[in-house]
Image (cartoon, helix red, strand yellow):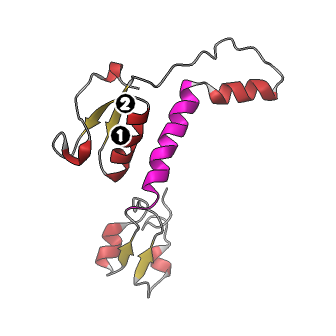
Amino acid sequence: MDLISQRSGILEKFKDLQLIAKRSTGVDNIDLTYCAAHRITVCNVPDYAEIAVAEHVFALLLSISRHLSEAVERTRKGTFSIDGLMGFDLHGKTLAIIGTGIIGRHVGKIARGFNNRESNMPFFPSGKHGLSVRNAPQRDCI
């Protein structure tokens, strides 16, 4: 999203702008180069909602593994057939966690509750932060 970038023309409209404060983690929608060149400070909340985001990962995984959106849509249409809705268990699966920052670490902790094996693309050595890290082929991961 290009909300606060040089291309959008928004930044140029605020000639005396000194600070952009976001109440979220990402700053990818802000032209940081422009802000640095014009001495505009950009602040964010680096740990914003990290547990909620990790929990949402599993809400989505469970929805996919149980074909929840398809089941809801069928029910809305009055179709109660379970054909094609057979899901799969998350238990014992290998979960690929790409990036093991604060959110990735929380995802790993929750994964243990599903008895998942974690396959991480780590930015730190295996074992740090209490995660057991191993490499696994993509085909083995959910």
Q: Dot 1 lies on which element? A: helix
**Residue at the extreme right:** 78
Front-most of residues 34 and 25: 25
Picture residue at 30% right of the left edge, 75% below the top: 36
Residue receiving disc 2: 95
Q: Amino acid at mark 1?
A: Gly
Quarter of the figure with residue 141: top left
Quarter of the figure with residue 32: bottom left
Q: Position of residue 111 (x, y in %)?
A: 40, 35
Q: Nearer the viewer, mark 2 or mark 1?
A: 1
Q: Position of residue 69 (x, y in %)?
A: 66, 30
Residue receiving disc 1: 108
Residue 34 belongs to the span the image colors magenta: no
In three-dimensional space, the C-alpha distance between marks 2 and 1, rounded to whole angstroms, equals: 8 Å
The residues colored magenta run 47-65
Picture residue at 48% right of the left edge, 68% below the top: 23
Are the residues at dot 2 and dot 1 in contact (C-beta closer than 8 Å)?
yes
**Residue at the extreme bottom:** 16
Q: Amino acid at mark 2?
A: Leu
